[in-house]
Image (cartoon, rainbow, N blue to C red):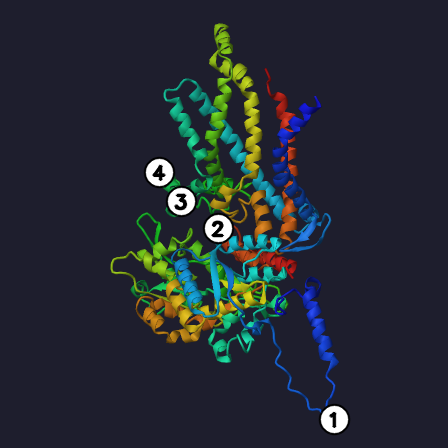
Amino acid sequence: MSDTVFVEEGKGMRRNPLAFAVALSLVLAACSGGAPTGGTAVTAAPTPEPTTAADISLGGPVQVTIWHNQTGALAKGFDEMVADFNKTSGKGITVKAEFQGNYTQIYQKMLGAIQAGNLPEGVVAVENQVADYAKAGIVVEVDPYISSKKNGLSKDSLADIYQPYIDANKYPQYGNKILSFPFIKSLEVNIVNLDLLKELGFSAPPKTMEEFEKMAKAAKKTGPDGKVTRWGWAGMGTEAFLGHVMSRGGQILNADGTVAWGGPEGIETLKLLERCYAEQFCYRPTGFDWQDRFGEGNLLFATGTSTGRPFIQAAIKKPGGINWAIFGMPSAGTGKSQTIQFGGVIAITKSTDQKQLAVWEFLKWFTDTAQTAKWSITSSYMPVRKSALDDAALKSHWGSKDIQGRQAFDLVPTSVAGPSIRGWQEVRDAIFEAITKVQTAKAKPEDALKDATTKANNVLKENK
Amino acid sequence: MLFEHVEAYLFVLPALFFIGVFDILPGFFAFVMSLTRWGVIYERFAGLDNYAALLDPAGSRFGEFVNSLGVTVWYVLLTVPVEMVISLVAAFVLYQGTVGRGAYRTLYFMPYITSLVAAATIFEWIFDGNVGFLNYVVGFFGIGAQEWLREPRGIFELIGSGLGIAVPGAVAGPSLALLSVSIFTTWHFIGYQTVIFLAGLTTISKEYYEAARIDGASERQILTKITLPLLSPVIFFVGVIATIGAMRSFSQIYILTNGGPLDTTRTVPMLIFRTFFERTSANGIGLGAALSFIFVVIIIAITLFQFRVLGRKVFVE
């Protein structure tokens, strides 16, 4: 059994007597030393490199199953890449990619699989779900695989992956160990109708919150019946809220693990939202219908995932099209433009050393420059490597068909990973509740945020 | 004699086996789970801690449990009586020898045989705040567009604000979102209840009506003195079943609102689901199991109450 299997502190030896026996024998072996021979002076032997299950060689054909959440064209693209890996890896690995529903459905199935002890070798999840799986002791620590001399990533290769993408896979409740690896990455971005912006007399997208609000207000237009027919902004969700808070100089979490978004930056963000609805320059979406308003030319700004690009493009129905662009979060006060990045990761689950290594080999391949660029073209997700910019196919794609893709990619350095902690989904729910209260005028921003902060901190306390 | 008993037991054995394996054992195991702290994995035996967290006013989950119980009560009140009245009226109309009774009966029954999930998805469009058909219809009556499934404000509050009257939160009533879900539920179950009422009406002997008419009874008297009393066992049955069904409703709420906005449609089953599957890491399985058992006890208590109080008013020939 692997010694890189992650188990909750203090529980490992009780759960894994074999690991305990191996560890004990290693300690005894280390203490026993060796008798000097031949009467010659004893020189210290070079310390052997520590080896882990990440350093083994694959000993034959090995099949692994990965549960994923890709559908439609993305599933087809993913399956093709998996088939390509199976054909070309030359290591006897067969990856079986199985669609198991969305994140929530996969999580629910994983709960059953954990109780039954019948797990896939790899699973797509969001970070807080991985933190839950880690509590069950079924997740393999990835650090030894990354740093393995034999099977790992070189220093340059690791540095090529954007730091926020690595950071997202570090789990503070588990000693900041890396327990998953990037799979699909997106970030919260703003989009703007450049034609409308110009029509309103503005030359460039806003840099500050003040400019943002001014432009959004200017976009509001009403029909003869007094109803609003053109709006300034749509799309204040949980991620946008956090992006605004950070861009106003705030933080997501305090050092003591409590939430930090309940302060003045959070209140200012919700006050902007309150004004936006009260003065009716915000469009209230019921799903993704804001894309239709944008496509008709009746929406100036929207905030959402960078991966929504193809849908926005498809929604543009205005004759002659719309000249649109992606831009970062406007800032305010002492803040600098920052946004949240999010998306699925893959966790390797506890199985055999061979299977664990096989999943790692797949992850390594899937995130190399050529594959991450290819996957980015297929899926519109962000590539995880800086070097993807040198990929000819991606360059051409972003240079012609998807220029906004490059604009989003340029914002990756301003992105921050959301906390990879247990209970984070409930914290997001609490933020969303505060947003809904303000949207529906059920509460003032201060009260809504106070309630949300209390709820979120209780959740985090429960999950400590 | 003994052989006859053995034979009887042998006949019920398969049923007993399946009930035991799929109902009693899981039920027992769920009860055991409710006595544990169980997040993603079993952590420890917790005694009655989970029950205390839900039932003790100082407990960490008491507030949300009481809220969901209140939502469930509103949901039952908005659906069961309305369904029963409409389906009873429909059954009476159909029973009067209406031309094309069979076709009407099929028409009424159609919503019930339509997949709940598919129908709820269609209603999601109808209720859509921006492009929904319902807003188009209410627009003819001078009513502005509503966020049918996303409006957390109470219906009395909304009516009050339309009339310029400020209605305090305590009497704001159920949210518009809950009312919308209730409208869908009512639409879905009317046909089922109509068919049962219609079957009940056909069992009443025509001789009673003939005798009453010979004695000069008016139609109103026939309805209140003959039809309703003789139909009361069926009304009682439908009432009990509909109440239990409404309390256990899940699919349509999950599809239409998923418990939102602001938990105003989070009935107890929705809370159980959320606790169990969406808040698993923080003792979700232990708390979810305890919540299920408390809810079972509440349903049994309400059903017993219906039997004790309303059951006495049932007329048995």
- CA–CA distance in space, label 3 to label 1: 90 Å
The mark lying in front, picked from 1 and 4, is 1
Dot label at residue A82 = none
Q: Which residue is mark 1?
A: A39
Q: Amino acid at mark 3?
A: Trp
Disc 3 with disc 4 on a shared chain: yes
Q: Amino acid at mark 2?
A: Thr
**SS for tag 4?**
loop
**SS for tag 2?**
loop
Dot label at residue B140 = 4
Q: Which residue is mark 2?
A: A440
Asked if B162 appears above or below A110 in the picture, the reply is above
Callout 3 crowding tier (Cα within 10 Å): few <14, some 14–19, many ≥20:
some
Q: Amino acid at mark 4?
A: Phe
Work out whether mark 3 precedes mark 4 in sequence or the reverse, and give the earlier one.
3
Q: Which residue is mark 3?
A: B125
Q: Amino acid at mark 1?
A: Gly
The mark lying in front, picked from 2 and 3, is 3
Residue B134: where, in percent of width, then height?
A: 39, 40
- CA–CA distance in space, label 2 to label 3: 21 Å
Q: Is residue A145 left or right of residue B51?
A: left
The mark lying in front, picked from 3 and 4, is 3
